[in-house]
Image (tube, helix red, strand yellow):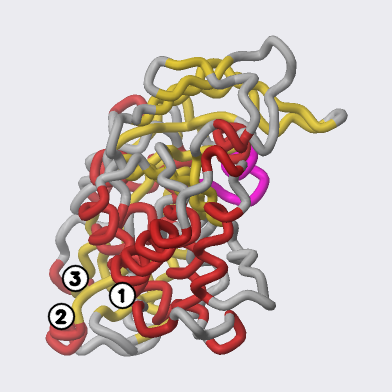
Amino acid sequence: MSVQVDNIRKTFGGYTALDGVSLQVKSGQLTALLGPSGSGKTTLLRIIAGLEYADEGSGRIQFHGEDVTDVAAGKRKVGFMFQQYALFRHMSVFENIAFGLRVRPRSARPAKSEIADRVHALLKLVQLETLADRYPHQLSGGQRQRIALARALAVEPKVLLLDEPFGALDAKVRKELRRWLRQFHDEINLTTIFVTHDQEEALEIADEVVIMNQAKIEQIGRPQDVYDHPASPFVYEFLGNVNVLRATALAAAGSPATPAALQSNGRVYVRPHDIEVIPHETGLPGITAILRYIHAAGPQARLTLEQVDTRETVEAEISRAELNRLNLKINDLVLLRLRQSHSFAEDYAI
């Protein structure tokens, strides 16, 4: 089931939540709506679900070519999972999953045996078949998340919508469940759109990433494409750690910055892992910097350095083996060389 959003605008009083947003999600695709708080991603998800409506006359929503713009949420056949799961505390796991089926009109309600079969099949699908008689307070956060997902799937939705599905979980459980969700999606092959502000999460599990900022879409693309080829300074800075350096200060470093950026005294964007640290005494071209801090916990060492010419801070990442080989100490003088960087012709320094 494909989803198409055309020129959607949504305002709340004087606040613009969505400003002419258009988007197409292919059938069976796992799509992430990624952006900071207030970027409009949850509002867009709720409009797709029918829980909110766009401003009158601003655009339309289509499911596989069928216009559902004015169709009520209950008739769109969408499965929606809220960030806080919204499980009924007084109901067992079984009853929570069965709820959406039991409240259907009598003419559309499955038989009790069919409901039971579907609930047990979903419990097996989310790998929690032994927990049917438990109550939400007896489950871990990760288990509650899976039960909420099973409940969303019970009504056999055409589209699955997830609002910050891992936001209430600790880091370790979140990592485990997002890998599980990717595998789960590959099994059910259901068109899925999920909202997140976690860049790593979106880049790891999504087929396509929609990056939003200030009520608009900044870029749409595959995870590797948006990371390697950001369309704007915002995308570059939002998708992971980045150094923003003055282009003119890099001329002596052999920077791969574009001539336009160098001529305009623009800014150059470089990831910490794309900075090579070499001893100052080599005399090779590079940015002269002073090592101010070393964080060596983990597989990579993170270095904080101060440029001698500008006094601006630079962060670099090198392997622990490279750190040992260089035998670096605080206040050592080093040279920084850029393996790869990016600049935007319109992005001028002030």
Is tag 2's residue or tag 1's residue first in the polypeptide sequence? Answer: 1
- The front one of 128 and 235 is 128
Residue 313, how many percent across, how many down?
Answer: 47, 64
What residue is drawn where x is 54% and y is 49%? 80
Task: Name the amino acid, label 2.
Answer: Glu
Magenta stretch contains residue 201: no
Position of 46 with respect to 221 (left or right) is: right
The residue indicated by pointer 2 is 322
User: Are discs 2 and 1 less than 8 Å apart at CB?
Assistant: no
Which residue is more in the foreground, 190 or 167?
190
The amino acid type found where label 3 is placed reads Ile
The spot of residue 29 in percent (x, y) is 29, 39
Q: CA distance from mark 1 to mark 3?
A: 51 Å
Seen from the viewer's position, the closer of residues 43 and 200 is 43
Q: Residue placed at 51% from the left, 15% from the top? A: 67
Q: Which quarter shows the N terminus?
A: top left
Task: Please tell me whether mark 1 sits on a helix, a strand or a loop.
Answer: loop
The answer to whether one can see residue 251 in this image is: no
Of pointers 1 and 3, the one earlier in the residue sequence: 1
Mark on residue 127? 1
Residue at the disc numbered 3: 278
Local SS, label 3: strand
Judge whether residue 186 can be spotted in this image: yes
Q: Residue at x 49, y 52 (%)?
A: 162
Residue drawn at the location 24% of the way across and 83% of the way down:
299
| Numbered disc in front, either 2 or 3 | 2
Disc 1: CA contacts within 10 A as few (<14), some (14-19) or many (>=20): few
